[in-house]
Amino acid sequence: MSENPGESFVIVYGDIDRFKVYNDLFGTHAGDQLLAAIGAMLRDLLPPNTAVARLRADHFVCCCPHSLLYPDRLLSLLDDWFANYREDFTFFVRLGIYVIDEPELDVSLMCDRALLALKAAKDGHAGSKYALYDETLRASVLKEQQLAGEMVKALEEGQFVPYFQPQYRYAAGRMTGAEVLARWNHPERGLVSPAEFIPVLERNGLIARLDYYLWEQACSCLRDWIDRLGADRVPRLSVNLSRADIYRADLCSYLNDLLRRYNLPTDLLHLEITETAYMEAPEQLVDAVTKLRAAGFVVEMDDFGSGYSSLNTLKDVPVDALKIDMGFLDARDRTRGGIILASVVRMARLLDLPATAEGVETQEQAVYLASIGCEYMQGYLFSKPLDRASFERLLTEQPSAGEEPPISEDAREDAIQQRLYDAIPCGIVRYTADDIPRMLFMNRKACQILGYRDLVEYREVTGGDAFAPILPDDLTVQQSYFETLREGEPPCDFALRYQRRDGFVGWIEGTSAFEVNEEGCPLVQSAFMEVTQQRLDRAESAWQNERYRLLSEMTNTISFDYDSESDTVLLYIDRTGKGMEAQVISHYLETLESTRKSVLHPDSVADVRAMFERARAGAQEVGTEYRADYYGGGYAWYRTKLYVVHDQNGAWHLVGIIEDIEDERALRFRAEFDAVTGLTNHAATQELVSAALANPDVRANSVCVVLDIDDFKLVNDTCGHIEGDALLHAVGMVLRTNFREGDVVGRVGGDEFVLLLKNIDPEVALRKLQRVRTQIAAVPVVGRSTGASISAGVYLTCDDDRSYRDVFVKADEALYQAKRAGKDRIQMYQEG
């Protein structure tokens, strides 16, 4: 750097993920050979005028000119080299980069900053395989280091406490076990979520200490419960093995010693491994699981389905049970997730692997899981994670295996019938057929429709009156249905208005039937659905076509009705000025590109077809803006808004209106765009930038630029505003042609422009700006021997930037730094 004071340099820090694993698998000699090969490769690969060194172990650092560093290309070359070095082992390479902005710093501190960026890349903060150092990153790392220091103390002082989330066998309603979870009882902050401290423990190599502590706590609890409550009341506990634990050579003997110390059988302590651990170290995981199972431990695969290759994992890792996280699958019948889940449970049963569903939160999920054969469940529907005292109360309330009361056959049949009815997706009620009908039975769907938690609550609120939810105006109709059934008539259909417990008024439709139970008591059973929305839709569609015809006539719009079954469009259009003309277009979609090309603008055909595809995919409302020539006078802009309705034959229609928006688009353009440059104006630019920054990916990976034309006022003063506007127009053209359609490019006043280049590598952004600068320099200026020039301020956005002002102020400051340095230059923002 001292020899090239005018050059900007960077420190690049890299290491090899899993190098320790490589040494363990192939020996330290092979590891030394790998390090030597890497050194030779780096000497050949890196550009001239570059210093490269190995700091320690597998850590390498280099210093090179900023202008010669292309991180994506360098990573690609490194990945190719490592992929060819050894095909039976996968290497991962990440880089931390520090752009040297303080040359007077000690070199070791420069390397430390690059190392911080490397850690950020490994943690995924940067969203790619490399990260650039900045002060925000340093503050984040320091905060994490402080938290890690507190955790060491917390582990020593026993601030981490076990929580227990019960696991149930759904059909029996009985707890069968519990998962042991960690909570941090911080002396000042109270309970800290594991989502906050587990990643920090993992990144700082402390997770294994927490695991050992929780295993010990679990065994201590089991021993205490057996001594106080008896072995038949104590459920098994499941504890987690982290990825760090499987590298422990004495893992199996350590756990065996732990159980011997507390005099516990292996079947009371189940071990959970994560599927993602297989992705990182498959050989170690398979070996560890095999040894643990041989020692008598039950090994469960946690979060099955969340990894990249679930079936491969199941094929290779010999586990005893599966745990399926409901967060990854939508547990409902006839959904894609529900079908996959049913297949996973069926596969587990064929492999004789008990499956436990985690994260069960609704009764609907539990019923569906039971229907596909998943017996064991865990989640907030049954219980949140409990502290030790709460869990012990739950243990004492649950009868032991020997004390469990026998279930009578009648009770068993009633329970089975209740579960069957609860699985039916319509309301079912049963009530007495005497003069004052009393509610006897409601399935879960009936309770949901009528707004009650269960039959007990219904009876408490209504006194058991079977007709209580029916609106008074419809009670006479319901009474007539009821009397007809009591006279022996066959089942009858009904449609009635009802009032839900929360006051909502709607419609139910269904069928009622008379029956006599085994004791000879007359009953009525009704099955029904909530149809409020369907009735509104039917009423709407009954006069839909007539309404659109009248609307077309009164508003001079075009009404549109597409019949999906016949692929036919009916248009009501005033083509002659003498009233509405009905125009029938057959084979509309089939011939859209051919026969309709004289009407639809070629650039709008794809948009129109996409609108129909959205309706075909299930959307209930679609629309688009497009150009067409309906009247033979040239293309104009139209907007259509269409709704999906169904006719009596079951075919779906798209019906709605088409309105001319040519004047509206012209007004919209004038409101949002600058007339001179064709770019967005100040207000629109502010809105677009703020909206883009709402996306965290954009905030973390974008570049904001503020630029202006050097000495533009002089151009206006000496050449006139016409020449000034011509120069603004030329600059606007250069900016439009050099940046992507998704970028924000706007004129925000006078000769000042703002750009937000989204999700872009800073080096790519700078190259684009240099190209813009070169092209603008070629724009002639009247009365000058040289072309125009620009100055630009560049700011790399970060997660703290939430508004237009956040990024504009910093890029604008960089612009004025460029101006103070002599104009005609591009300046990166430097804080302070």
Image: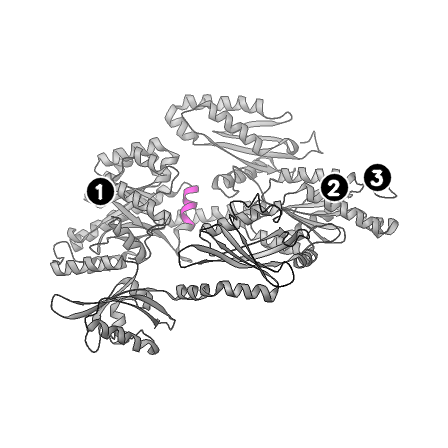
* Residue on which the image places disc 3: 786
Q: Which amino acid does the dot numbered 2 rest on?
A: Arg
Q: Is residue 152 left or right of residue 367?
A: right
Mark 2 or 3, closer to the camera: 3
Stretch of the chain drawn in magenta: 196-204
Question: 577 or 527: which is nearer to us?
Answer: 577
From the image, state whether disc 1 or disc 3 is nearer to you: 3
Asked whether 480 or 141 is in front, the reply is 480
Answer whether residue 249 is visible to the viewer in this image: no
The x, y position of residue 745, in whole percent, is 67, 48
Q: Callout 3: helix, strand or loop?
A: loop
Q: Residue 666 is drawn in which quadrant?
A: bottom right
Total numbered badges shown on the rendered structure: 3
Q: Residue 517 falls in which quadrant of the image?
A: bottom left
Give the foreground label among 1 and 2: 2
Marks 2/3: CA–CA distance:
16 Å
Helix, strand or loop status at disc 2: loop
Residue where numbered disc 1 is placed = 259
For label 1, the crowd category at 10 Å Cα-Cα, with few meaning under 14, some 14 to 19 and many 20 or more, is many
Majority SS type along the magenta span: helix
Labelled disc at residue 825: 2
Instruction: Tell me the residue at 12%/69% (across/down).
Output: 520
Q: In which quadrant will I find the N terminus?
A: top right
